[in-house]
Image (cartoon, grey):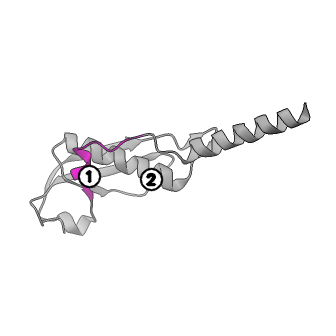
Amino acid sequence: MTSKIHICRALLLGALVTLTGCTWVKLSDAGAAVTLAETESVAACQHVGMVTTQTRHKVVMERGDASVHEELLVLARNQAAALGANVIVAMGPPSEGNQDFAAYRCEPDAAG
């Protein structure tokens, strides 16, 4: 009986570790055309709007910062594409699963 409990605990722990490291959001084809840039790089670009992203930073326990950051970036790229943007600029670091981005439409080579 004790070995069954240990096996169940190990499986549950493995599932939790897997869940906390996963990214749930998929990059759309349009989002794949959107790049992340620094503020200085978009001076010649047209500002088309703001994108606010949000994801769960906890699933039973804290998710890894890298997973949360990647998911926020994918969400921002997908949303920016829907605005007709091809470049985003982070307005600050992620905070508790939230991050804001400015969305821009840049001519080729304008946001290099």
- Residue at 25%, 57% (x, y): give it: 35
Give the distance between the C-alpha atoms of the residues marked 1 and 2, in whole angstroms.
Answer: 16 Å
Residue 18, image quadrant? top right
Q: Which residues, given as a range, are shown in magenta?
A: 25-36
Q: What residue is disc 1 on? A: 102
Q: Secondary structure at mark 1?
A: strand
Q: Looking at this view, is 110 or 31 the one in front?
A: 31
Residue 74 vertical position relative to residue 6 in the rendered view, above or below? below
Extreme residue in the top direction: 1
Nearest to the eye among marks 1 and 2: give it: 2
- Residue at 23%, 52% (x, y): give it: 34
Circle 2 crowding by C-alpha within 10 Å: few under 14, some 14–19, many from 20: many
- Residue at 13%, 58% (x, y): give it: 106
Relative to 23, 84 lies left or right: left
Q: Secondary structure at mark 2?
A: helix
Q: Looking at this view, is 105 or 34 the one in front?
A: 34
Q: Looking at this view, is 106 or 21 the one in front?
A: 21
Relative to 53, 59 lies left or right: right
Residue 28, image quadrant? top left
Amino acid carrying label 2: it is His
Q: What residue is disc 2 on? A: 69
